[in-house]
């Protein structure tokens, strides 16, 4: 056993190998290129769209500050995007600290530089850390900036964060001002990831809702758009009603709420900013909440959302107390907003976010400002329509009492309200208590989940959205399986246990239906789910409870004839039969379940009278072959998959890339 001197010598030798030469200092934009995930979250498709969001945020800051009235978002072929505003334009004069560089070049090449750290350039802004534009430049293969100031046009080009030439005076311009930035992401960082026009289109529309004084003009080259016509080539977004217009668009297909919406806008005391809100309680009781700060989406909420929830809760309790309704005191914020559509947008000086991606607001003062401002208006709203206010309070008290009954109940069977409400995840359960005649649809993502919830029969159909592609259980360790939240939610929702603990009698639904998009990604997700059920709940398959939904890939119409095609082969079959001899057949391709109108999803995929389901079975004489196939295609040995691909490659007739 070594003595203390031996240990000291070992430590000294290890320390001698670690010297000052091992300390690396990254300069300029190199930190961004080395670790893009620190600045935009990663290098996947979602992170790629964050670059456009950074540019739109800068343009929106100019609009909110009163210096720009319109913004252009232009999509070109070859993954190129332009964002243009008619604001003041980025300064082009020499920077006082970096005299050999213009202020424009400093902003584009230096982290933590900009006009939003203090002073009076912006009262409120979404760009706070001075890294947005420089990060876009660092991660762009090419970037060109045009600045129109004082009736002159200045241009400069960059490549991977480095200027390719000096700032150029391109001469006089008339009737033009502001900043235009055109960039193409660096393929060495983002690989084959491409901008999705439909996502950028929604992003532009959402920004226009958040500031009623701005006009956002969407333009896209036809070559960059999906061929199904789901995204227009040109559109101008301008919503004078702000969040009230946004709310109306969300609930448009969900039936007119019995209660009028609570909408409004107000300034915070002392010039600290202002807030705008729009809240409705639709009859379908399906929640949707979205919050923003300085036009930046905050999907994880934060202190401003806490203020909203507190204002609504205290307002309802105060109204109930005035009305002599003692039951109102048992209401919680989740009872009050659990079935509401709530939108909140705040504008603050120097807001604090968690992380550069700004997904959660952490400004402590925001809670007090939002609560005080909204509660006063909510009190007036309730007092102005006592009949509607009483109806709302009664509805929310019923939710609270259902929650309390569930908590008090000790039953754990399918009929237990406690079990139903304690289920994790975003399960929208059905109303029927017994399993007979009920079914649960397992869908991918909140978007598809929202469409399915609107399309379902609330009496007998439940919907469980899962987030992303689930774990491949055939190649994962038991610890990973136990730690996976999405699979944990699924197991708890079904209630029948795993493997040797599986009990068909405890299954909470008669049918378990996998419902994914009718494309390659959807097939992949369905395969992962089938692998899970095969390995962990094989009794579910043996008892005939597992099904695959067959959503359509195409909608085909000619005159009054409208039909749906499951895939390309079915589409060609319909062209030869239903539309034989017809010309100009209108064909649209569904991007996914989340993009499909609820009525069409109900008709084609969810209504028992009009849908088609595939029941998953294992033939008695194919059990060994099935086990081998699952192991080869989904197991831990990649060589088996590679051998399968080599053996069957000649069977592929068309490769859709």
Image (cartoon, rainbow, N blue to C red):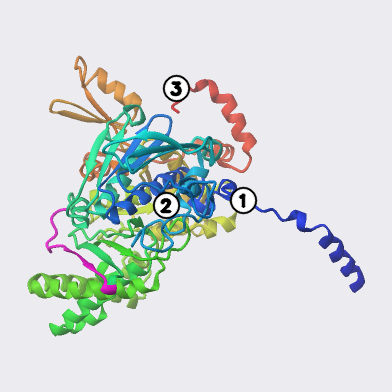
Relative placement, left or right, of 344 versus 10 is left
Give me the C-alpha separation between circle 2 and circle 1.
38 Å
Residue visible at 36% across and 51% down in the picture: 57
Going by the picture, which residue comes out furthest to the top? 581
The correct choice, above or below, for 234 with respect to 324 in the image is above
| Dot placed on the residue nearer the N-terminal end, 2 or 3 | 2
| Dot placed on the residue nearer the N-terminal end, 1 or 3 | 1
User: Camera-side residue: 182 or 550?
Assistant: 182
Q: Is residue 184 visible?
A: no
Report helix, strand or loop for mark 1.
loop
Q: How many marks?
A: 3
Report helix, strand or loop for mark 2.
loop
Label 3 belongs to which residue? 654
The correct choice, above or below, for 314 with respect to 193 in the image is below
Residue visible at 53% across and 35% down in the picture: 164
Residue visible at 48% across and 46% down in the picture: 102
Relative placement, left or right, of 403 versus 255 is right
**Residue 405 location (% of width, % of height):** 28, 75
| In the image, residue 266 lies in the stretch drawn in magenta | yes
User: Camera-side residue: 105 or 170?
Assistant: 170
Tag shown at residue 467: 2
Label 1 belongs to which residue? 27
């Amino acid at each position: 056993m070594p003595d203390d001197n031996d240990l000291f010598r070992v430590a000294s030798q290890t320390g001698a190998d670690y010297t000052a030469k091992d300390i690396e200092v990254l300069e300029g934009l190199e930190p961004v290129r080395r670790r893009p995930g620190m600045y935009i979250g990663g290098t996947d498709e979602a992170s790629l769209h964050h670059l456009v969001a950074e540019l739109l945020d800068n343009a929106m800051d100019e609009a909110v500050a009163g210096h720009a009235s319109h913004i252009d978002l232009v999509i070109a072929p070859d993954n190129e995007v332009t964002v243009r505003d008619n604001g003041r334009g980025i300064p082009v004069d020499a920077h006082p600290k970096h005299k050999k560089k213009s202020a424009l070049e400093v902003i584009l090449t230096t982290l933590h530089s900009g006009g939003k750290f203090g002073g009076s350039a912006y009262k409120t802004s979404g760009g706070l850390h001075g890294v947005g534009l420089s990060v876009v430049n660092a991660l762009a293969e090419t970037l060109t900036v045009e600045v129109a100031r004082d009736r002159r046009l200045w241009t400069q080009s960059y490549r991977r964060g480095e200027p390719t030439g000096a700032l150029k005076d391109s001469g006089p311009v008339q009737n033009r001002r502001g900043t235009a930035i055109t960039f193409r992401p660096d393929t060495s960082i983002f690989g084959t990831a491409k901008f999705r026009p439909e996502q950028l289109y929604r992003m532009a529309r959402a920004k226009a809702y958040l500031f009623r004084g701005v006009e956002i003009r969407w333009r896209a080259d036809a070559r960059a758009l999906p061929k199904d016509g789901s995204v227009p080539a040109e559109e101008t977004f301008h919503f004078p009603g702000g969040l009230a217009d946004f709310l109306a668009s969300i609930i448009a297909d969900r039936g007119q709420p019995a209660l009028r919406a609570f909408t409004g806008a107000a300034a915070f005391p002392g010039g600290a900013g202002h807030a705008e809100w729009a809240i409705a309680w639709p009859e379908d009781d399906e929640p949707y909440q979205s919050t923003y700060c300085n036009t930046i989406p905050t999907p994880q909420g934060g202190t401003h959302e806490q203020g909203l929830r507190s204002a609504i809760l205290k307002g309802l309790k105060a109204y109930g107390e005035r009305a002599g309704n003692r039951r109102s005191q048992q209401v919680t914020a989740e009872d009050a907003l659990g079935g509401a559509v709530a939108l909140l947008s705040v504008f603050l000086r120097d807001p604090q976010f968690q992380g550069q991606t700004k997904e959660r607001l952490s400004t402590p003062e925001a809670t007090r400002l939002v609560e005080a401002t909204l509660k006063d208006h909510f009190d007036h709203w309730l007092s102005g329509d006592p009949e509607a206010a009483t109806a709302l309070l009664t509805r929310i008290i019923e939710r609270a009492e259902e929650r309390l009954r569930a908590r008090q109940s000790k039953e754990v069977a399918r009929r237990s309200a406690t079990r139903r409400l304690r289920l994790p995840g975003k399960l929208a359960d059905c109303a029927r208590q017994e399993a007979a005649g009920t079914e649960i649809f397992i869908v991918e993502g909140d978007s598809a989940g929202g469409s399915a919830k609107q399309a379902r029969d609330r009496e007998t159909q439940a919907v469980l959205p899962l987030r992303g592609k689930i774990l491949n259980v055939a190649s994962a360790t038991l610890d990973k399986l136990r730690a996976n939240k999405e699979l944990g939610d699924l197991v708890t929702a079904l209630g029948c246990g795993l493997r040797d603990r599986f009990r068909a009698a405890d299954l909470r639904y008669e049918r378990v239906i996998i419902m994914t998009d009718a494309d390659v990604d959807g097939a992949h997700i369905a395969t992962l789910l089938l692998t899970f059920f095969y390995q962990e709940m094989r009794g579910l398959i043996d008892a005939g409870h597992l099904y695959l939904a067959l959503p359509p890939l195409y909608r085909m119409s000619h005159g009054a004839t409208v039909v749906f095609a499951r895939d390309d082969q079915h589409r060609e079959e319909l062209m030869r039969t239903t539309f034989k001899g017809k010309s100009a057949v209108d064909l649209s391709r569904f991007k996914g379940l989340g993009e499909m109108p609820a009525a069409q999803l109900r008709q084609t995929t969810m209504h028992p009278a009009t849908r088609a389901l595939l029941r998953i079975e294992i033939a008695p004489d194919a059990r060994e072959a099935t086990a081998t196939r699952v192991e080869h295609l989904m197991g831990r040995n990649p060589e088996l998959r590679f051998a399968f691909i080599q053996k069957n490659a000649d069977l592929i007739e068309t490769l859709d890339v």
